[in-house]
Image: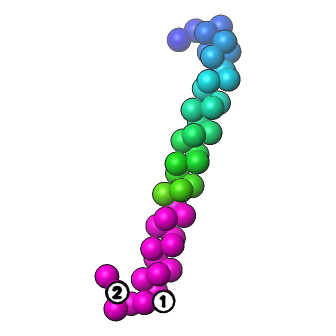
């Protein structure tokens, strides 16, 4: 990939990176929620 095509596709690249960040944030949030739920209710699996 050349620098020209990279700059031409910078908008879509930034968008895909943003989507990836959102997915990571959702995964981390879900894991944290599950950890808090397990910590508050240790007998519930």
User: Can the viewer see residue 13 in this picture?
Assistant: yes
- Residue for point 51% across, 70% down: 32
Which residue, given by chain and number where applicable, does mark 1 sit on?
40
**In the figure, 8 relative to 30: above or below?**
above
CA neighbours of label 1 inside 10 A, class few (<14), some (14 to 19), many (20+):
few
Residue 33 coordinates in the image, percent (x, y): 51, 72
Q: Position of residue 12 (x, y in %)?
A: 62, 24
Residue at position x 57%, y 32% in the image: 16
Location of residue 2 in the rendering, given as x and y in whole percent from the top left corner: 58, 9
**Magenta span includes 30:** yes
Q: Quadrant of residue 41?
A: bottom left
Measure how far apart labels 1 and 2 are at the Cα level. Answer: 9 Å
Point out which mark residue 44 bears.
2
Instruction: Please report the residue visible at 34 percent of the width from the left and 91 percent of the height from the top.
Output: 43
* Residue 38 falls within the magenta-colored stretch: yes
What quarter of the picture does the C terminus occupy? bottom left
- Magenta-highlighted residues: 28-45
Other residues around mark 2 within 10 Å, as few (<14) / some (14–19) / many (≥20): few
Question: Which residue lies at the image location 67% right of the left edge and 23% below the top edge?
Answer: 11
């Amino acid at each position: 990939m050349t620098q020209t095509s990279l700059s031409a596709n910078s908008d879509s690249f930034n968008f895909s990176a943003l989507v990836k960040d959102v997915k990571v944030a959702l995964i981390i949030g879900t894991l944290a929620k599950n950890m808090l739920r397990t910590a508050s209710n240790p007998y519930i699996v």
